[in-house]
Image (cartoon, helix red, strand yellow):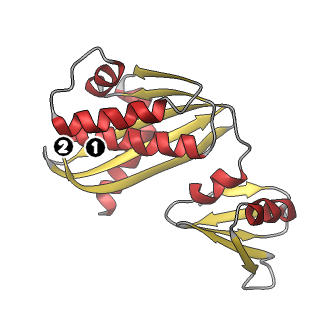
Amino acid sequence: MPVIECDVDEARRTLADAGVIVSDGKSEYEEWRARHGDAVAIAYDDKLVIQGANPQDIEAILRDAGGHAYLYFDGASRGNPGPAATGWVIVTSDGIAAEGGTRIGRATNNQAEYEALIEGLETARDYGFDSVDVKGDSQLIVKQVTGAWKTNNPELRERRVRVRELLEEFDKWSLKHVPREVNERADKLANEALDDG
């Protein structure tokens, strides 16, 4: 549950300008509430508490556009194919900007890896970052997306094309393979999403 310390009157104006419906608070302590997508923002004296399945739906509107981010992604599958989930983390110089993990049904590990990368890139784009350094522990995904390896599987090829389209929306990007221990948070989010199912 993200907490954003801010001028809540300014945040209200920003959300209203973006077309978000803002309503009165439900208690004497709440100044107002706003619902957008799968997120609800609750304003208190000097902070917003954001709840819901996708807090980034509101965070993306309130964050200043631009800047550089690091995206870590991982997919998990129990069985190959089997129940699968994604995990991703977006980090800036200020810390974690957003993170998520989602069950995606039955998939192979490689399909889950691609889905995690797609979810993370879509969020980074929605947050308005200009550039992104992407890191994952799947050598196959990194090599296929960068063109070092061919993508023979039609389902993976379709996902690779989507990833390339998303990467081209950034002014600058890179994609690198990292050891699993460097990708620990994204791995944990994917496995937590699987456990929650």
Compute the Cα span from label 2 to label 1.
Answer: 6 Å
Can residue 187 be seen here? no
| Furthest residue in direction bottom, as rendered | 27
Give me the residue at 24% from left, 41% from top.
111
Name the image quarter holding the C terminus.
Answer: bottom left
Circle number at residue 86? none
Question: Is residue 13 left or right of 133 when viewed as pictured?
Answer: right
Q: Which residue is mark 1?
A: 112
Give the class, few, some or many, for how many residues have Cα within 10 Å of label 1's Cα (few <14, many ≥20): many
Badge 2 density bin: few <14, some 14–19, many ≥20, Cα 10 Å: some
Quarter-of-image position of residue 102: bottom left
Vertical order, 29 against 181 (above or below): below
Q: Which residue is mark 2?
A: 108
Q: Quadrant of the N terminus?
A: bottom right
Q: Is residue 181 above or below residue 11?
A: above
Q: Is residue 39 above or below residue 106?
A: below
Instruction: Return the residue found at the far top.
Output: 148
- What residue sits 81% from the left and 85% below the top? 28
Q: Position of residue 181 (x, y in %)?
A: 39, 28
Confirm whether residue 3 shows in the render.
yes
Of residues 6 and 171, which is closer to you in this image? 171
Q: Are marks 2 and 1 in contact (CB under 8 Å)?
A: yes
Q: Position of residue 154 (x, y in %)?
A: 17, 36
- Identify the residue at horizontal 33%, vertical 33% (top origin): 161
Q: Is residue 125 left or right of residue 195?
A: right
Q: Amino acid at mark 2?
A: Thr
- Under circle 2, the secondary element is loop
Residue 98 image offset from top left, x and y in percent: 56, 47
Which amino acid lies under the numbered mark 1 shown in the image of this protein?
Ala
